């Protein structure tokens, strides 16, 4: 047996502990996400963190050639089977849909939980992170895409985050590249440069096109000219290939109007890293630019389930990932949210009234008031220090003499106020303060 | 790159997919657990699924010699560091407490999430399972134990599960074995046989004591006689060692009375498998015996954090694990719960009224009614078949002629009723049905 005299109490690189203040905030965010997903008719799905390695790598055969392949955490079970930790929620969804043909379509599901990538660790990039996905499987029409954009508005409005949704259709971008006679095998790397439109200067872009992608200056300038066009009608006249993408985009916008989707910005330069997107793509940004990364992103992936499962018919899908970590970072940076160090709203402190104090505590808890008691033999001032450290907003001090008069002492810590309250009206008073906000 | 022509769409042995009907039920259970943990002043903590292998195995050096050691899923990160998947929530808690001395005590936390054991797969035993733990760290007095038992009552009452809490104190059991001069190194295996008291016949027990534990028949009979005693006062007179355990137990019962804990049964034979328990131990069972396994179990583990972290003072702790899977099994078996195949409560079906139907849908969603729309060109009867398959309770059919009269058609699927409703009163009607239950 391993001896552990000097073992280290650290956690693995790229992982984190969320102490209560962070986890309370995360739970709040997850609650907002879940409840609104369900209002939009998406049901929850849970798949295991562990998948067969063959299943996880099947995605790549189906078109995806991202870093995720090199970044798999692999392991073996006691039967020596090769396993891997899931790196997203899309592969598991494709597997579930392909192996459960009895599931009625449309299948609208959400999935929230950890995923893993054994990649380089940077700011905002972790090896263990939470993925939060919403997808509609089985609808090829653009109203499914519009509905997801409507969900985006609802979620970020609820969170009080002013946002902008950049949308595009992959087919338009591919059409532009085809028009310019850029060979298909170069598209992927050219798109990587296109994705940097808002980050690099014109000169840097031209240089990257020439030096790294082998695109001559004239063609590169033409690409830049085309992807800066903001007007769909102008674009329509200027492209030959990609008209199918424009048609889908106009269909999408028609439904967006019916769903009353706001804050849409057409951006033909939007490519999105993942190669499995086939049509609509979108990214959501905070309007105030407090955080530059996208807060959510997604698109339509009509081919993957079929390729993945070798079915003879296409199973279309469209979905979005909400970036839980980046949204949390935004909420903290924007000072819109108060970090709570404990869930506890009320601490009961007995002064030689253990029995009666537990009675009061039990009454509070029966009324769903988040409450606790300090029964140790520490001094009152030490107990109040604990209250202050944990930022518990209310304290009920139960003194012997007070009780005789049917009273308790009620402290509102923020106001620094202390007053006597009738024991019988304590709960009503607290409910008014806590639940009527 | 791996080719995947014939890969298999299965999931790893000992793991499961929870399709919406199962996951909706699980989410409901988790919500009841979480909200009541918070009412009792426990705050959430999240730790990574991945831990350093040295940390995970440190527990065993600290006393625990269970199968978990042999059943670790191990892996390596890209820096070739040895990692493991957590097998419980206790080791991560001990690590967090030991490495964050600034956390104010008492530290009351809950943790819910997946854990992994690479062990044999049996009914109800999975390789990936959910762990749900509640612990109070930093209180040595028995009121922390009583509070957790009070939480047990609250949770199972809320779930409508009649239950019984068997309690004991490890020190009493150890005392009995000491009194009978059973050598300390034999205690662990003797306790394993004692744990079978309610499963084996007297003859089988005596045989196991003799053949497998090397206990002579007279001593074995004496053990059986002692562990069947139900009366604390009788036990008090009969034992020499273990009086400290009895004292703690009486203290616990005193606090249980104040917390109004119900359904307690003293059972001196209760040993609990885990060796790290130092004092109070308890297990919760369904009174109707529908499921024989315990639904929740826990105890006091005063030594582990100190041993684990090499601190110079003891950090006492007491906690409980709720068996999410077994509680779900119970709820399904007891027919107390209705499995929902979708979260959706209302499906809107347009009859050539796409725009108006999306308007109605948007109104429903604004009022937090879980709703969806069927915009495909399938026939009405196919759409109603989808409603029946997913057991969606209400349908709103939006016809052109009806709309002219300010009406829609409202179907209650369970009752098989269909009636016209004024468009303006639809929401009120639905809110009355859905939210006033």
Image (cartoon, coloured by chain):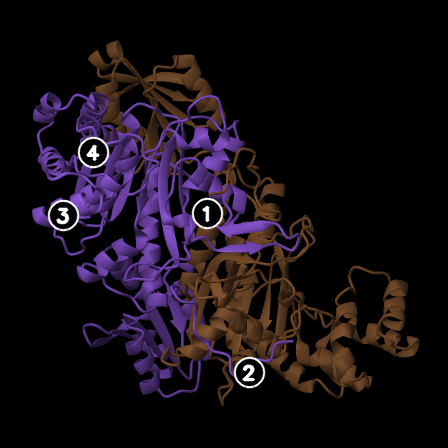
Chain colours: A brown, B purple
Distance of mark 2 from mark 4, alpha carbons? 58 Å
Q: Chain of mark 3?
A: B
Residue A257 visible, this orientation:
no
* Residue located farthest toward the top when viewing the structure as drawn: A401
Task: State the image coordinates of residue B232 (x, y, percent, origin top left).
Answer: 11, 27
Tell me: B345 left or right of A238: left
| Residue density around tag 1, few if under 14, some if 14–19, many if 20 or more, within 10 Å | few
Say if B401 sits above or below B174 in the image: below
Looking at the rendering, which quadrant does residue B40 occupy? top left
| Residue density around tag 3, few if under 14, some if 14–19, many if 20 or more, within 10 Å | some
Looking at the rendering, which quadrant does residue A235 occupy? bottom right
Q: Are marks 2 and 4 on the same chain?
A: no
Distance of mark 2 from mark 1, alpha carbons? 36 Å
Looking at the rendering, which quadrant does residue A323 occupy? bottom right
Q: Are marks 2 and 3 on the same chain?
A: no
Instruction: Give me the disc on residue B168.
Output: 4
Residue annotated with mark 3: B207
Q: Nearer the viewer, residue A262 or A387?
A: A387
Say if A400 sits above or below B81 in the image: above
Instruction: Give me the disc on residue A27.
Output: 1
Distance of mark 2 from mark 3, alpha carbons? 61 Å
């Amino acid at each position: 047996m391993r001896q552990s005299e000097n073992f280290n109490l650290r956690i693995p690189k790229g992982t984190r502990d969320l102490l209560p203040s962070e986890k309370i905030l995360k739970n709040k965010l997850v609650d907002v996400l879940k409840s609104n997903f369900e209002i939009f008719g998406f049901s929850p799905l849970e798949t295991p963190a562990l998948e067969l390695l063959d299943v996880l790598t099947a995605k790549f055969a189906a078109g995806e050639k991202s870093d995720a392949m090199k970044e798999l955490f692999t392991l073996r079970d006691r039967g020596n089977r090769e396993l891997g930790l899931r790196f997203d929620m899309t592969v598991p969804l494709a597997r579930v849909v392909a192996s459960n043909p009895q599931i009625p379509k449309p299948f609208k599901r959400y999935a929230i939980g950890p995923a893993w990538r054994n990649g380089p660790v940077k700011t905002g990039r972790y090896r263990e992170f939470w993925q939060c996905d919403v997808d509609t499987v089985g609808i090829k029409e653009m109203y499914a895409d519009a509905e997801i954009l409507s969900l985006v508005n609802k979620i970020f409005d609820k969170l009080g985050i002013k946002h902008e949704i950049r949308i595009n259709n992959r087919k338009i971008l591919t059409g532009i590249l085809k028009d310019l006679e850029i060979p298909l095998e170069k598209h992927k790397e050219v798109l990587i440069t296109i994705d940097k439109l808002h980050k690099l200067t014109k000169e840097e872009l031209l240089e990257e096109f020439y030096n790294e992608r082998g695109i001559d200056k004239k063609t590169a300038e033409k690409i830049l000219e085309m992807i800066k066009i903001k007007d769909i009608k102008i674009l329509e006249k200027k492209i030959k290939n990609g008209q199918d993408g424009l048609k889908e985009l106009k269909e999408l916008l028609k439904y967006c109007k019916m769903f009353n989707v706001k804050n849409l910005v057409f951006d033909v330069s939007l490519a999105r890293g993942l190669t499995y997107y086939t049509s609509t793509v979108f990214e959501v940004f905070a309007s105030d630019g407090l955080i530059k990364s996208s807060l959510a992103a997604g698109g339509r992936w009509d081919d993957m389930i079929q390729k993945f499962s070798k079915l003879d018919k296409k199973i279309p899908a469209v979905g979005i990932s909400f970036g839980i970590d980046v949204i949390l970072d935004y909420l903290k940076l924007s000072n819109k949210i108060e970090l709570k160090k404990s869930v506890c709203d009320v601490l009961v402190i007995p002064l030689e009234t253990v029995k009666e104090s537990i009675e009061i505590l039990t009454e509070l808890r029966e009324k769903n008031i988040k409450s606790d008691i300090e029964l140790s033999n520490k001094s009152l001032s030490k107990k109040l220090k604990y209250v202050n450290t944990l930022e518990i907003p209310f304290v009920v001090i139960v003194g012997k003499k007070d009780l005789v008069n049917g009273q308790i002492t009620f402290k509102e810590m923020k106001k620094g106020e202390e007053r006597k309250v009738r024991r019988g009206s304590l709960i009503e008073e607290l409910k008014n303060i806590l639940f009527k906000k």
